[in-house]
Amino acid sequence: MNISSRARWVLLALACVTGPQAAISQTTTPPPAAPPVTPSTAPQQPATTPPATAPQSASPAQPNSTSPTGSTAAPQSSTPVLQPRADQDPQDGTTFTLHRGVNEVDLIFTVMGKDGHFVANLQQQNFGLLDDGRPPQHVLRFTQQTNLPLRVGIMLDTSSSIRQRFEFEQQAATDFLLQVLHPADRAFVEGFDVQINVAQDFTNRIDMLDTGIRRLRPGGGTALFDSLYRTCKDQMLTLQQDSEVRKAIVLVSDGDDDYSRVLETEAIKMCQRAETIVYTISTNVGPSRDKGDDVLQQISDATGGQTFYPQRIDDVAIGFRNIEEELRSQYLLVYEPADFKRDGSFRTIYLHSLDPRYGVRAKKGYFSPHE
């Protein structure tokens, strides 16, 4: 009994020792059995990793909600100006700004019928366009604009040659501003002979503009080209605006110049750099045009404006009214030119109506920006 009882105790002790070992072996056995599962769990691990990285790649794309992730390059190259600006990330914003500065051209133009009246409600397909001899790469926008805010400069010739006609110029200029200025518009007034006299800077107040006009006095020589050059450079080229505006100058003169150091071509180029339309009103009243009238015509044609030739000095006001009507009846074409180079060169524009009944008036070209 003692031997058997001892044997029993030994067997129980062994069972206690081998039992935990068996339990350990049972718990350690599943990991070896897990390898068949590991391939299935291994794909799950990479599958769980992308969600971890996906938010990182999606977070920059979230601000640019208009374009899906992975396809942002295509919208930037096709229609960059239609993409949001303020909410893009720094990298995309830098690329967008560069692309827009190089590629986008705003072309303002007027369409008139043979009867001299403005033609409205035309579509993009009614026109043909060549930029530097090539069709545009993309047309981004085509709209008819009738109420775009204006930034208008009134340049009155105050030289001795127009002394007898000056009062008509003053009255017509005031009447024009009374008709044309809306709450969002701004205008300035200046007189010029051998020097420029800015009688009133940009404002919307008619009383201040009228006071500036009345302060001007005629006398001296005529530096027409110098004055136009400096006005576009100082007043229009430096104009800073948060929204889209239309820049125009109304130049009232006989077109004679006997004092300028700047050439006519240089004055025109500065107007083109400032993207300013120049309308000219001749104060030469007579049966035939003279050399000064041709000068005024060349300036307005090159910048997309128009020249008016009143038959009587009292009709100067008619020219102002026609300009007011035209400024509210224009089209805007925004496009990306083909083969564009950021080298500061002058690029010609040829825009025409496919319908021979209509004539198109637009600027003759523009300067590409420098690098």
Image (cartoon, rainbow, N blue to C red):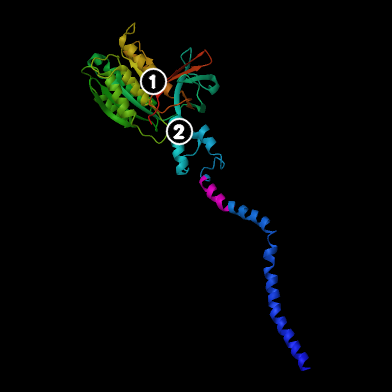
Above or below residue 164? Residue 204 is: below
Disc nearer the start of the sequence (1/2): 2
Point out the stretch of residues depicted in magenta.
51-60
Q: Examine the residues drawn in magenta and state their main secondary structure.
A: helix
Query: Does 54 lie within the magenta span?
Result: yes
Amino acid type at circle 1 is Thr
Q: Residue furthest bottom?
A: 2
Spot occupied by residue 310 in the image (x, y as percentages of width and height): 35, 12
Q: Is residue 351 left or right of residue 206?
A: right
Q: Give the distance between the C-alpha atoms of the residues marked 1 and 2, in whole angstroms.
A: 23 Å
From the image, state whether disc 1 or disc 2 is nearer to you: 2
Query: Does 71 lie within the magenta span?
Result: no
Q: Is residue 349 left or right of residue 177?
A: right
**Secondary element type, mark 2:** helix
Spot occupied by residue 69 in the image (x, y as percentages of width and height): 56, 43
Say which residue label 2 marks: 100
* Observer-nearest of 177 and 331: 331
Q: Which mark is residue 102?
A: none
Q: Quadrant of residue 239?
A: top left
* Image quarter (top left, top right, bottom left or bottom right) of the C terminus: top left
**Secondary element type, mark 1:** helix
Q: Are marks 1 and 2 in contact (CB under 8 Å)?
A: no
* Observer-nearest of 327 and 40: 40
From this viewpoint, is residue 175 visible? no
Q: Which mark is residue 303?
A: 1
